[in-house]
């Protein structure tokens, strides 16, 4: 069964702290992996897309890594800001064209 | 340009009633996807449309769920005889071409509450 798990379910940090969100998947036959941000009333926003042949992608203060062999991806957020508060979703596209989402990590960055 | 829009943003309905949810994709996007997100759970894929091809209905949870799309325009997701377990946020997304490997642009969702 192709499952995607995100830990922790919720995280609260003070402003300025660096943090890591985790995503694990059970099947290594993936095509790509995406990290999304979900804000209430605004839908999902794609943050980073990592192809299966890549190890990491960076955008501003965000860095996502991918380790297919261990079935893990991390999203690193540097110097967190209150505006980073949102739910972060990991989505895995498997080679059989099945896309699975994790349940998300709800991040709160306190001023 | 305008993004994906969905209406209504919130819908409260009584058990047993039918509901219709609407999605307006980004103009020019041929692919359209419907997802469901229950509280505390990941997104579940429901159905996708690609142009005039027959939709992939493999994710629809029961025959009470149906969706329509005319060409590359608006789509409606209909839930008949709603049940409390249908309560969820229903998200719509569109992309330029059908394939989950293309970036999908999501709407704000419709929060459905069945009482």
Image (cartoon, coloured by chain):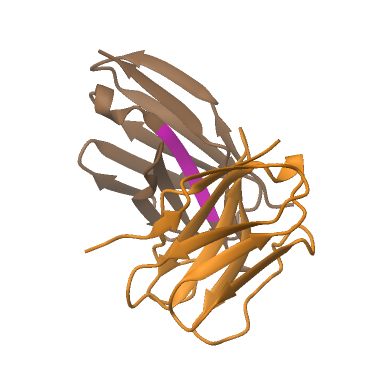
Query: Residue B78: percent from the left, percent from the top?
Result: 64, 62
Query: Residue B63: percent from the left, percent from the top?
Result: 79, 64
Q: Is residue A57 left or right of residue A91?
A: left
Query: Residue B48: percent from the left, percent from the top?
Result: 57, 70
Q: Indicate whether A109 appears above or below A31.
A: above
Who's the residue at 52% across and 65% down the image?
B33
* The quarter of the displayed image where residue B45 is located: bottom right
Who's the residue at 63% across and 83% down the image?
B54
Q: Nearer the viewer, residue B103 or B30?
A: B30
* Residue A95 visible at all: no
Q: Is residue A42 left or right of residue A79?
A: right
Residue A94 shown in magenta: no
* The quarter of the displayed image where residue B102 is located: bottom left
In the picture, which quadrant includes the N terminus of chain B?
bottom left
Rendered brown, the chain in question is: A
> For the magenta stretch, what is the residue range?
A87-92
Number of marks: 0
Q: Indicate whether A19 appears above or below A70.
A: above
Query: Which hue is chain B drawn in?
Result: orange
Q: Nearer the viewer, residue B36 or A74?
A: B36
In the picture, which quadrant includes the C terminus of chain B?
top right
Residue A90 shown in magenta: yes
* Residue A92 visible at all: yes
Q: Indicate whether B40 appears above or below B54.
A: above
Query: Residue A25: percent from the left, percent from the top?
Result: 60, 45
Q: Main secondary structure of the magenta part?
A: strand
Who's the residue at 51% across and 48% down the image?
B110
Q: Nearer the viewer, residue B14 or A32?
A: B14
Q: Residue furthest bottom?
A: B52
Who's the residue at 62% across and 69% down the image?
B67
């Amino acid at each position: 069964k192709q499952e995607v798990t995100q830990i922790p379910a919720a995280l609260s940090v003070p402003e300025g702290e660096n943090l890591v969100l985790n995503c694990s998947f059970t099947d290594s036959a993936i095509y790509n992996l995406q990290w999304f941000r979900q804000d209430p009333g605004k839908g999902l926003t794609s943050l980073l897309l990592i192809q299966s042949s890549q190890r990491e992608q960076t955008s501003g203060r965000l860095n996502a890594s991918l380790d297919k062999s261990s079935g893990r991806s991390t999203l690193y957020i540097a110097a967190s800001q209150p505006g980073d508060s949102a739910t972060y979703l990991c989505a895995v596209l498997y080679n059989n064209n099945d896309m699975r989402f994790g349940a998300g990590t709800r991040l709160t960055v306190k001023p | 340009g305008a993004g994906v829009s969905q209406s209504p943003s919130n819908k409260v309905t009584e058990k047993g009633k039918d509901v219709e949810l609407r999605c307006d994709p980004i103009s020019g996007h041929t692919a359209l996807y419907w997802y469901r997100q229950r509280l505390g759970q990941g997104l579940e894929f429901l159905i996708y449309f690609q142009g005039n091809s027959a939709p992939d209905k493999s994710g629809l949870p029961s025959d009470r769920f149906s969706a329509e799309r005319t060409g590359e325009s608006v789509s409606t997701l209909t839930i008949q005889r709603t049940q409390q377990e249908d309560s969820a946020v229903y998200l719509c997304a569109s992309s330029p071409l059908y394939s989950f490997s293309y970036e999908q642009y999501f709407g704000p969702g419709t929060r459905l509450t069945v009482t």
